[in-house]
Amino acid sequence: MGIRVDTKTCGKCLETKPLDEFHRNKNMKDGRVSRCKDCAKEASTQWRLENRDPEAQREYMRRWHDMNRGRRYGLTPLEYLRLEEASGGVCAVCGQPPSGKRDRLVVDHDHVTNKVRGMVCHPCNSGIGLFQDDPERLRAAAQWVQTHREA
């Protein structure tokens, strides 16, 4: 039977504290982050003080979020940035820059092979997904729309 550990030492302040003083993280060996909650909060507050420009904060968080989002598809942050750069800032399907509430391109992938296809806008990505990545359904829908537009 394993030894139950109820405490952990913070990697920042070096204090030994109860486990509930550390945020959970399933990727860590012991299931908890290395800094205690107090040190994590202090670091977060310090970062916000040093980076007061709200626009810069939003941009930083957007880029961080996007780069981490690429991990879902097996992309490294560098591969994600290259994919984003290759898109030229426009959707690979409609050729338009993203706009509206969701103003960034997203990673599009094949749901069968999980292979990344490129960067698309949210409406195109949703449409492809709702048509279950089926080219025949997409062609049929396009024909349907074309037929009723001409009528």
Image: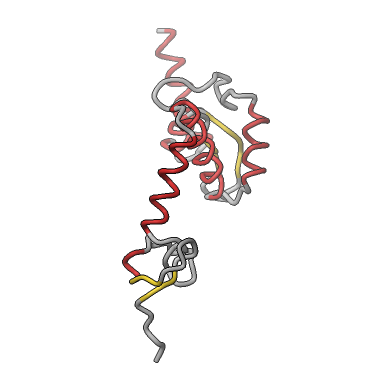
Residue 119: % across, % down: 58, 33
Which residue appears at 66% of the width and 43% of the height? 79
For the rendered model, the colour scheme is: secondary structure
56 and 93: which is toward the camera: 56
User: The C terminus appears in which quarter of the rendering?
Assistant: top left
Vertical relation: 96 (above or below) 46: above
Which residue appears at 46% of the width and 67% of the height? 14
Is 150 on the left or on the right of 113, as rendered? Answer: left
Is 1 on the left or on the right of 105, as rendered? Answer: left
Q: Is residue 123 visible?
A: no
Residue 13: % across, % down: 45, 63
Vertical relation: 73 (above or below) 118: below
Which residue appears at 42% of the width and 69% of the height? 15
Residue 146: % across, % down: 46, 15
28 and 103: which is toward the camera: 28
Is 118 on the left or on the right of 128, as rendered? Answer: right
Q: Is residue 26 visible?
A: yes
| Residue reaching furthest to the bottom | 1
